[in-house]
Amino acid sequence: MGSPCELVFDSADELTTSERQSLLAGRAEALRIEQTYSRYRPDSALSRLNQSQGRAIKVDAEMALLLDFADQCYRLSDGLFDVTAGALRAVWKFGSDGQTQMPSPDAVAALLPRVGWHRLRWQTPVLELPAGMEIDLGGLAKEYAVDRVVALLQSQLTRACLVNFGGDLRVSGPRANAQPWVLGVEQPDDVRRAAAVIGLNQGALATSGDTRRFFEHQGQRYGHILNPKTGWPVIGAPRSITVAAPTCTEAGMLSTFAMLQGEGAEAFLQAQNVPFWLQS
């Protein structure tokens, strides 16, 4: 998942054998999703899809589900949430990737013909991806993995659990004695401090922002979320946006949609009538 991941059970006692088996099953499911949809693994199903060179490829039911959701996100966001924007990584590198200089406008513009969900052909379950384009499900697969693992653990456990993949998380229910899970939102400039403390009994939280992945140039901070229409980072958005929703997939979608609105992020979230926390 490219980030720290944890499964937490609400118990002061040692786990039983069956609970340990459930924990291992949850871990295996997370690894399966990572191995299937990681863009970093040349043997992943997603990498093979990206190497199809325009051939029509029939995908399995799970991949079709994610691509249908990607299509829905593209349409709902008026083209701002676009899983084909990964091609822009050729000139934009953030965080541990080590961006050292600002890409030229010409270099960014040269990649734009390789970006755009509207350029590919998707008719469930068949995809035709033009040569040179690629799909990056990083903005969907991690949240999907959280929801899948929670569902698996809920089917096997009686006690509550929390699944946290890189700060995108979901709880199966309240802790013992109806106590909420107490969660902190990282301070963008100091991840050791909590900018907000949230009590969560049910549902999910997802956070988008530039706390860990950014690039600075001439005093300007550029976050890793790119506008696929321009090829440049979104300007004017909050440093961090956390959204609560019934599922991690929904929370992640809304937090990313909001970041893509730039200065209109807060107004967008207010219109969605969901709990949210902004850090500027």
Image: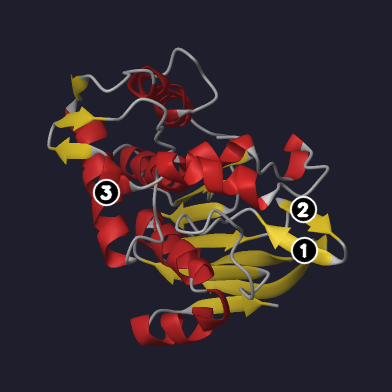
Label drawn at residue 215? 2
* Image quadrant where one finds the N terminus: top right
Q: Position of residue 60 (x, y in %)?
A: 19, 25
Badge 1 density bin: few <14, some 14–19, many ≥20, Cα 10 Å: some
Q: Dot 2 lies on which element?
A: strand
Kindly identify the residue that appears in the image at 59 percent across and 47 percent down: 108
Residue under label 1, please give it.
221
Q: Position of residue 180 (x, y in %)?
A: 52, 68
Q: Quadrant of residue 172?
A: bottom left
Q: In this rendering, which labeled residue sits more in front, label 1 or label 3?
A: 3
Q: Nearer the viewer, residue 101 or 278?
A: 101
Q: Are marks 2 and 1 in contact (CB under 8 Å)?
A: yes
- The amino acid at mark 1 is Arg
Residue under label 3, please give it.
118
Kindly identify the residue that appears in the image at 45 percent across and 31 percent down: 30
- The amino acid at mark 3 is His
Vertical relation: 265 (above or below) 54: below
